[in-house]
Image (cartoon, grey):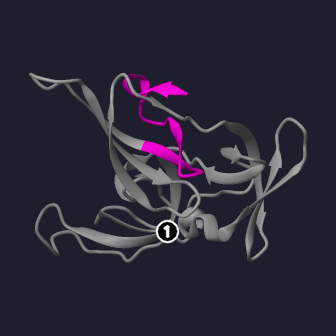
């Protein structure tokens, strides 16, 4: 059990026998009455979003989750296959858990996997990742106004809008939460 005032972003709560990840938390201290937290949560099993108000002194059940660091191996068409970095056991994550995960997984890279009741419920990808531009159209300087962007496709198949000066085979940094271009990476 966890107090409402101790709930923070990243906490996993058990609501209606389902694990919910806190994605936003706003603390409110009104002039009269008890302080409370306005919490926005994502169901880790089906992706639904729930917003709830929890009074600071109230107790809420937190979910017992385990995080394992696993190395991504391959996609078999229906599942993402990982290897546990400690025990070398195979961890199978259904593709239906997150359809867009395929754009962020790179073979040989390690990712934290959240396990609840011996079942993987979430794969955490870094907030910012480096990608190689696989497909890009070339634009001639002076074609458009400043701040113009173009769509490119990364080495994992992700489509991102980037400034016109980005060329094929260059490395770029992308925010994985918004799929937005951050900067060009040298090296």
**Tag 1 residue:** 158
Q: Looking at the picture, tell me which residue is in the foreground, 80 or 158.
A: 80
Whether residue 156 is visible here, answered yes or no, is no
Question: Which residue is rendered at x = 54% and y = 35% of the image?
Answer: 61
Q: In which quarter of the image is the N terminus?
A: top right
Q: Looking at the picture, tell me which residue is in the foreground, 1 or 12.
A: 1
Question: Which residue is rendered at x = 65% and y = 53% of the image?
Answer: 121
The region drawn magenta spans 1-22
**Residue 27 figure quarter:** top left
Question: Which residue is rendered at x = 54% and y = 71% of the image?
Answer: 157
Whether residue 148 is visible here, answered yes or no, is yes
Q: Tell me the crowding category of disc 1: few under 14, some 14 to 19, or many 20 or more residues within 10 angstroms, Cα based.
A: some
Label 1: state its secondary structure. loop
Q: Does the magenta stretch include residue 17?
A: yes
Picture coordinates of residue 11 (x, y %)? 50, 35
Picture coordinates of residue 2 (x, y %)? 50, 26
Question: Which residue is rendered at x = 38% and y = 77% of the image?
Answer: 137
Q: Against 24, is 148 above or below?
A: below
Picture coordinates of residue 182 (x, y %)? 35, 49
Q: Does the magenta stretch include residue 9?
A: yes
């Amino acid at each position: 059990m966890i107090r409402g005032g101790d709930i923070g972003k990243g906490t996993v709560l058990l609501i209606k026998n389902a694990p919910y990840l806190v994605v936003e938390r706003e603390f409110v201290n009104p002039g009269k009455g008890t302080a409370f937290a306005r919490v926005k949560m994502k169901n880790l099993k089906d992706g639904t979003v729930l917003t709830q108000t929890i009074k600071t002194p109230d107790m809420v059940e937190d979910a017992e989750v385990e995080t394992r660091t696993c190395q991504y191996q391959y996609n078999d068409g229906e599942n993402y296959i990982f290897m546990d970095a400690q025990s070398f056991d195979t961890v199978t994550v259904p593709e239906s858990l997150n359809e867009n995960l395929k754009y962020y997984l790179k073979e040989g890279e390690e990712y934290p996997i959240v396990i609840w009741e011996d079942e993987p419920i979430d794969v955490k990808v870094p907030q910012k990742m480096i990608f190689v531009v696989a497909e890009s159209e070339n634009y001639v300087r002076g074609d458009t106004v400043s701040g113009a962007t173009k769509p490119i496709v990364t080495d994992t198949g992700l489509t991102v809008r980037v400034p016109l000066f980005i060329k094929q085979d260059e490395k770029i940094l992308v925010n994985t939460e918004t799929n937005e271009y951050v900067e060009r990476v040298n090296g």
